[in-house]
Image (cartoon, rainbow, N blue to C red):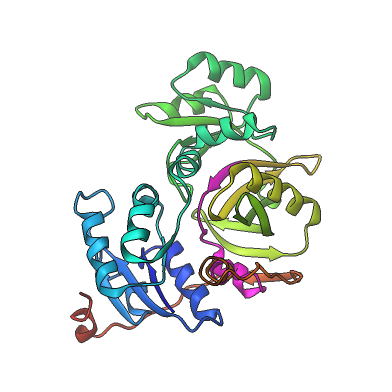
Amino acid sequence: MKALVTGGGAVLGQGIINSLRRSALDATIVVTDPNPLSAGLYWGACAYRVPPADDPAYIDAISGLLEREMPDVVLVGTDVELAAFARHRSALETRFGTRIIVSAPDVIAIADDKYRTFEFLRAHGFDPPGSARADDDDAVEALIEQVGFPLVVKPRIGARSVGVSVVHDRDQLAGALNGRSGLIVQECIGTPDGEYTASVLVFDGVPCASIVMRRDLRDGNTFRAYSGPYPALNEEVRRLGAALNPYGPANFQFRTDKSGKPRVFEINARFSGATPLRALVGFNEVEMCIRRILRDEPVATSEIPEAIILRHLSETLVMPEALEQVR
């Protein structure tokens, strides 16, 4: 089989490639990215430069690439490409006979906006951290009265903790909001020791598999993960997956409160940066999705062991002649 992976320069795209390489699928991997110095471009069988996702020429470039390579499946490796693939998924699949693992536009939109995430969770009976749009003074004041400080200030649309700050009083809050727009103010739940990342696979509205890992963060990314059964948390993650109804993978990030209850603050309607870490403990969600979508195989999982996963840097040597092979 042949798989096209976008975002060869992103943690997510590189994680998808690594998961494919660890799988039993024997996939030929085609990689794309706008930047020829993206390491993941040199991990596949061939590589292509494409315009950025917000470029009007992006979908035409992807269409030309699909026509040339005819991949069996497309795996989206950056957040910024999700909306474009979601909008054009049906047309691209019909025209080129491929399968694109991307959720519906409304699911992508819910996950992309943290205030919409809050509204979705609350509307479906979950208990997300209290949240208010930063431009709604009355709502921010009501949040302060309800939960007090500390509070978290973050962009409504963003990733990897960029632009996130924790404020402990009104002066710090005013400073975090000053001169900025598109922000959300959110209740600060628990402690970093109680932070988790979880994945669920959903097909036809039914959660088929899930995994929960406690994590330590560095620069917004998981750099240590602790796997285990976590039965109660997995049950909640599957309820979340059934409510969201993604096409295949979804990622939920949460902290537990003093009672041990999970309080979800972020949804990613896609594979996540921790995808290759999950594959190390037998939960290769990329392989499971491909087998289910391309071969109609049931999603098969094994018991998740208790383990510690340490993430570290690595290197890729690129010779000048290899740069010339990126098309």
Of residues 266 and 241, the one drawn nearer to the viewer in this rendering? 241
Residue at the image point whose x is 38% and y is 54% from the top? 89
Of residues 100 and 192, the one drawn nearer to the viewer in this rendering? 100
- Asked if 108 appears above or below 16 in the picture, the reply is above
- Asked if 118 appears above or below 145 in the picture, the reply is below
Q: Residue furthest top?
A: 138
Do we see residue 81 in this rendering? no
Do we see residue 203 in this rendering? yes
Extent of the magenta region: 265-287
Please state, as top left, top right, bottom left or bottom right, where the C terminus lies in the image.
bottom left
Residue at the image point whose x is 45% and y is 55% from the top? 102
How many numbered badges does the structure rendering display? 0
Q: Residue 161: horizontal and vertical position, in percent?
A: 48, 47
Q: Residue 43: horizontal and vertical position, in percent?
A: 38, 79
- Asked if 135 appears above or below 322 in the picture, the reply is above
Q: State yes or no: residue 282 in magenta.
A: yes
Please state, as top left, top right, bottom left or bottom right, where the N terminus lies in the image.
bottom left
Picture quadrant of residue 230? bottom right
Picture quadrant of residue 157? top left
Q: State yes or no: residue 327 in magenta.
A: no
Query: Is 35 on the left-hand or right-hand side of 196?
Result: left
Query: Is 150 on the left-hand or right-hand side of 293?
Result: right
Q: Residue 116: horizontal and vertical position, in percent?
A: 51, 33
Q: Residue 193: horizontal and vertical position, in percent?
A: 70, 52
Residue at the image point whose x is 66% and y is 74% from the top? 282
Of residues 254 and 164, the one drawn nearer to the viewer in this rendering? 254
